[in-house]
Amino acid sequence: MRGAARAITVAALIACCGCSTVLAQAADPVEPLRQAILSGNWPDAERELAYVQGRIDVDQIEILFLTGMVAVGQQQWARAEDAFRRIVDRHPDLPRVRLELARALYEQGKDPGAKHHFELALAGKLPPAAEANVLGYLERIRRRKLWAVDISAGVLPDSNVNTGTNQQIINIGGLPFTLSSEAREQSDVGLVIAASGWRGARLTNDWQMRGFASLLRRDYSDSRYDDMITRIGAGPRYVVGNAEFGVAPFFAERRFGNDVFNRSTGLRIDGVRQVLPRWIGESVFEVQEFTYPGQPGRNGEVFWLYSGGRFLLSPSSQVQIGVDWYFDRANDAAFRNNSVGLTLGYFKDWSWGLSTGFTARMASISYDGIQPLFGEYRNDDFNTYSASISKRDWRVFEFIPMITVSMFDNRSSIDLYSFNRTQVLFSFTRRL
């Protein structure tokens, strides 16, 4: 009897120990998975991952993160990207997840995306060692990247394709004149395609030779308002530490109504520098020599200078501020003008895979000569506002849908040149 009692006691103790283990696992079924990841035991990690996936008593965001870490441990970068991106789409303010997503993109050579997420992660108050590591990744991206392409295509309802005034009567020399319907604003719907890209060849560790090209074309049902701008150029680029600088001569052409509107040759000097971990500065200077077929009075040099930057507010938001100066030295003083503009922007990633952006540019334009038709000087206030929304977790062959609303408001001292214009662009965009 005493032997039987001891056996029953031992069995009960074993049963209780087993129950304790089961209860501990039931209290936190994810702990074995965490331990397998910490120890680098990837077969066990895969088994534990399969055990907890789909359970309703675990945090699915944590399971996605651990899925990404299991993939990282086995260098399955596409799988890791998918897991971390799904978290960022829901919770864009998590710097650790931004870092892991950026690394997964970097390991696949998807440098534009990696750069974007590394930069935003810097706004997450990272430890000094992690911050230095991120800056190192950004420098390596600048050095190794040898090409980039941006593509966008969409439909564009446009309220004022001819930038005409909405007034029916204007005064010329103190006398009223009625404008024809064609001289007033005309609406239309167009198709838009925009593409830009560059290709580099490494000369040394610090120097590259880059060629670049861009195309913007709008086709309307009334071909008189079709508009196309092309540019092509090449030049050296210097990458050093947290900055890069380039100089490039270029050629540009604009066709309006499918006829040549103007051509230009020019020189572009630009630079980008990570001034501070959360502040990225940028400056651009361009000089161009324009020719207008059939309009020699508009021929002349144009100078443009921009200086500004982006400040990383948080792992999900950033602001832009910039100032630009524009000088048109046309042969005819009536076309000669100069302007100063201020640009402000705010960009934010939200939950549900939504991203928004808002930019505003306010410019004041002064013309040097008297306008011959009106006998007075012309001064304009030209303001541009643009708001966009995209669904970054909806991808069709990596193209992301976007809606952009742009409003142009030109208030001129001469009524004929005042106009309002609204464009709504429904597009798909991709960056490579």
Image (tube, grey):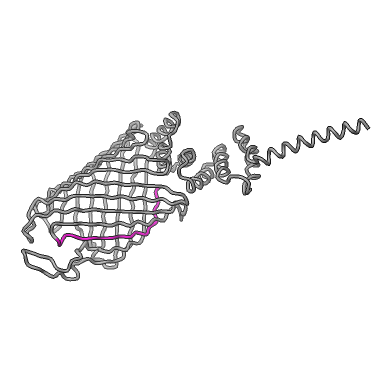
- Majority SS type along the magenta span: strand
Q: Position of residue 308 (x, y in %)?
A: 27, 40
- 345, above or below 3, in the image: below
Q: Residue furthest right?
A: 1
Residue 49 is inside the magenta segment:
no
Query: Which quarter shows the N terminus?
Result: top right
The image quarter containing residue 246 is top left
Q: Is residue 366 left or right of residue 107?
A: left
Q: Is residue 269 left or right of residue 61?
A: left
Q: Residue furthest top?
A: 129
Residue at image position (92%, 30%) is 2
Residue at image position (41%, 50%) is 355
Is any atom of residue 88 visible in this view? yes
Q: Is residue 113 left or right of residue 286?
A: right
**How many marks are shown on the rendered structure?**
0
Residue 430 is inside the magenta segment:
yes
Q: Position of residue 48 (x, y in %)?
A: 65, 41
Give the magenta-colored segment's residue range.
Answer: 415-432
Q: Is residue 141 left or right of residue 181?
A: right
Front-most of residues 351 and 294: 351
Is any atom of residue 203 visible in this view? no
Front-most of residues 1 and 112: 1
Q: Position of residue 40 (x, y in %)?
A: 60, 33
Q: Position of residue 56 (x, y in %)?
A: 62, 49
- 103, above or below 217, in the image: above
